[in-house]
Amino acid sequence: MTADWWRSAVIYQIYPKSFADANGDGIGDVAGIRTRLAYLADLGVDAVWVSPWYRSPDRDGGYDVEDFRQIDPRFGDVADVEALIRDAHKLGLRVIADIVPNHVSDQHPWIRAALATAPGSAEWSLFHAVAGRGHGGAEPPNDWLSVFGGSAWDPILNAAGQPTGFWYLHLFDATQPDLNWEHAAVRAEFEDILRFWFDRGLDGFRIDVATSLIKAPGYPDEHRAAGVEAGLSLEVVEGQPQWNRPGVHEIWRAWRRVADQYDPPRVFVGEVWADSPAGLAAYLRPDELHTVFNFDYMMCPWDADRLRAVVDASLSTAGLVGAPATWVLESHDKPRVRTRFALDAAGMDINDRSGPGDDVRGALRGRAATLFMLGLPGSAYLYQGQELGLREVWELPASVRQDPAFARTLGADGLRDGCRVPIPWTDEDPGCGFGPAGMSWLPMPSDWGAMSVARQDRSPVGVLALVRRALRLRRAEPALREGPMVWVAQEDRGVLVLRRDGGGAGDILVAMNCGEHPAHIAGGEILVASAAGIHAPDGGVLLPPDTAVWLRA
Ligand code: TEU
Ligand code: CA
């Protein structure tokens, strides 16, 4: 494997709480991940990215970190992670962890120390403790809203529980106070945390909310447009005083210097929502982050013209600064792709919890979308269970939901638990092989076992077989590994065909039909198809709606 492995890597996201439970307490753990590394190597991915596993009160799925140098006891300990990294490297897999620099848990020693002092103290200077407005500072300092709903400010109380007239900033949950990145101690601490893990062999970090570390001086109001209720999604707050401030780039340059001191150099992928292509490319400059997530691709509807435009824009934006594009359809924050397209096909809203939508079409489109994504040039992400074609568990009752945004918005938002249900390894009842005791921290639906790894292992037509075959081809074929792409013009509306250049090794066509009618695609042998029954009569293939295929050119 080469030093620039990340340019074309397929990276598998593990949400540790829900991946595999070795000790039977119903919560996934590091030992569980170790037992499944062979499965991942066989699947054919190049790396894993593990969502936060640090010591945490788990008020936001571990994105509320109490100690960045400790693994949460529910997951294991540092020695377990060191063993995981060793095992993974033996199998040729890289390991990327999550790091959460914008905020800490309210149990982190820094905020506990601050709370024992009055605002204005050295301890509070590590956070954003700001005088309120109005008489006695009774009102928040400005109009900023939490991404999870409600004000981004909560009052700082004194030891007697009385308001001090000062407020602390939390762009996310109230249990996640934002750090003050103007403070040199914050910068030094995080560079030290990077080294702590890089010294243990970690290959890189996914950087949580990489846009928000610097806030506009003086905390000006953001003057949201009337009707914009809350920072429920970062899309609506782009260009505001909390996001994408120029000063944030200095931080990533410093981190890159740390990563480049290692052999091989360690890598970063930023969670970046930017308001323009140039704004996004700024994070990808050669002395900043290696890659960023592609949310435009992730959010793109089932529409060939829009998809093509997003692919072109992604390639040209990253290309401005010589970075590879990335592609992603699922994560621990977004509805499963199958259900997103199923709801869309049924004309239902993404937050509608009244039913699965048109699941037949959703399932077809989800598999096609995953195959098409894996045929694009650059690096791609698969979220655990995407390789099984799992659906969103939309029917979870309110009583089991743990997403903090669900409570903060009284159920209007914060539905992320629906993609966080533990994944099914077998069809055994109860628990689908997630752990030895049949327990799981979120309930599994009754159709879960039918989609399990064990069940699909025996099926040549399952989503698992499709993904395995695609990943094998991606490694074997120079065209898919590093070949540039061009679009191949089509007469049929709604059909996308692109050609990957394999040089002497031969070109490959990647095609998807987002239209309403079967489309004839000129090409040779079918390498892999997203659905059964796609044939290649002489001179091409008749591609049904809602399917995708890879062909020799
Ligand atoms: O997410 C940042 C973020 O803003 C997302 O929550 C997004 O806006 C939301 O999912 C819309 O659907 C990151 C993590 O991925 C997320 O899990 C954390 O909750 C959040 O940061 C806070 O650390
Ligand atoms: Ca466990």
Image (tube, helix red, strand yellow):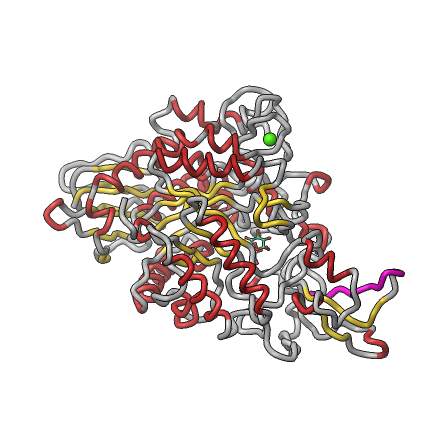
**Which residue is drawn at the image coordinates 54% and 43% (left, top)?**
357
The quadrant where residue 430 appears: top right
| Residue 528 rendering spot, x and y as whole percentages | 27, 37
Left or right of residue 490: residue 34:
right
Magenta span contains residue 101: no
Does residue 500 appear in this view?
yes
Classify the position of ligand 1 by quadrant: top left, top right, bottom left or bottom right.
bottom right
Q: Is residue 189 above or below residue 454?
A: below
Work out whether residue 34 or residue 306 is closer to the camera in this orientation and state it: 34
**Which residue is drawn at the image coordinates 42% and 59% (left, top)?**
258
Work out whether residue 1 or residue 517 is closer to the camera in this orientation and state it: 1
**Region of the chain picked out in magenta, as a range:** 152-160
Left or right of residue 507: residue 364:
right
Work out whether residue 90 or residue 11 is closer to the camera in this orientation and state it: 90
| Residue 190 rendering spot, x and y as whole percentages | 54, 58
Work out whether residue 475 or residue 528 is closer to the camera in this orientation and state it: 475
